[in-house]
Image (cartoon, grey):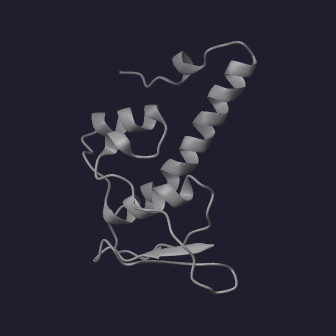
């Protein structure tokens, strides 16, 4: 499935199945970074860097990308497309890291903490 979000209209999202038929789409995520569907470490770092809310393209991409959807997003330069696609991928890596550390009986959270 693919989705497209137009950064100029927060509600302009269309989702199509691979056969071109319209599909239901996930609701955009919250306007708050604290509630974004990202790993806790990423949310903390975003808040620490001064991000307070996701851009429109991020609000639409994050819920879909964290569920493994293939996406195409069309938005202006500087609209947040790069973080829209990278942060869900980083979330998956972090979750796998924590899962493998838990399986090994360790705690990798100290290894993944950002240095001040």
Q: Tell me the quadrant of the picture where the C terminus can be found.
A: top left
Vertical arrangement, residue 8 with respect to residue 87, above or below = below
The picture places residue 85, in percent across and down from the top left corner, at 50, 58
**Is residue 45 found left or right of 14 in the rendered image?**
left
Q: Residue at x 31, y 60 (%)?
A: 55
**Is residue 72 found left or right of 18 in the rendered image?**
left
Q: Tell me the quadrant of the picture where the N terminus can be found.
A: bottom right
Vertical arrangement, residue 60 with respect to residue 9, above or below = above
Vertical arrangement, residue 54 with respect to residue 105, above or below = below
The picture places residue 12, in percent across and down from the top left corner, at 37, 78
- The quarter of the displayed image where residue 42 is located: top left
Could you say which is closer to the camera, residue 101 or residue 17? 17
Could you say which is closer to the camera, residue 81 or residue 52? 52
- The quarter of the displayed image where residue 45 is located: top left
Q: Residue furthest bottom?
A: 20
Q: Residue at x 52, y 16 (%)?
A: 110
Vertical arrangement, residue 55 with respect to residue 5, above or below = above
**Is residue 97 found left or right of 10 in the rendered image?**
right
Q: Residue at x 28, y 77 (%)?
A: 8
Could you say which is closer to the camera, residue 37 or residue 97? 37
């Amino acid at each position: 499935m693919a989705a497209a979000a137009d950064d100029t209209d927060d509600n302009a999202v269309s989702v199509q199945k691979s056969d071109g038929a319209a599909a239901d789409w996930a609701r955009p995520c919250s306007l708050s970074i604290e509630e974004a569907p990202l790993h806790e470490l990423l949310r903390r770092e975003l808040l620490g860097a001064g991000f307070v809310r996701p851009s429109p393209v991020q609000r639409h991409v994050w819920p879909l990308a964290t569920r493994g959807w293939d996406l195409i997003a069309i938005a202006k330069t500087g609209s947040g497309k790069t973080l829209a696609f990278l942060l869900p991928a980083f979330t998956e890596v972090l979750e796998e890291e924590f899962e493998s550390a838990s399986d090994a009986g360790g705690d990798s959270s100290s290894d993944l903490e950002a240095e001040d």
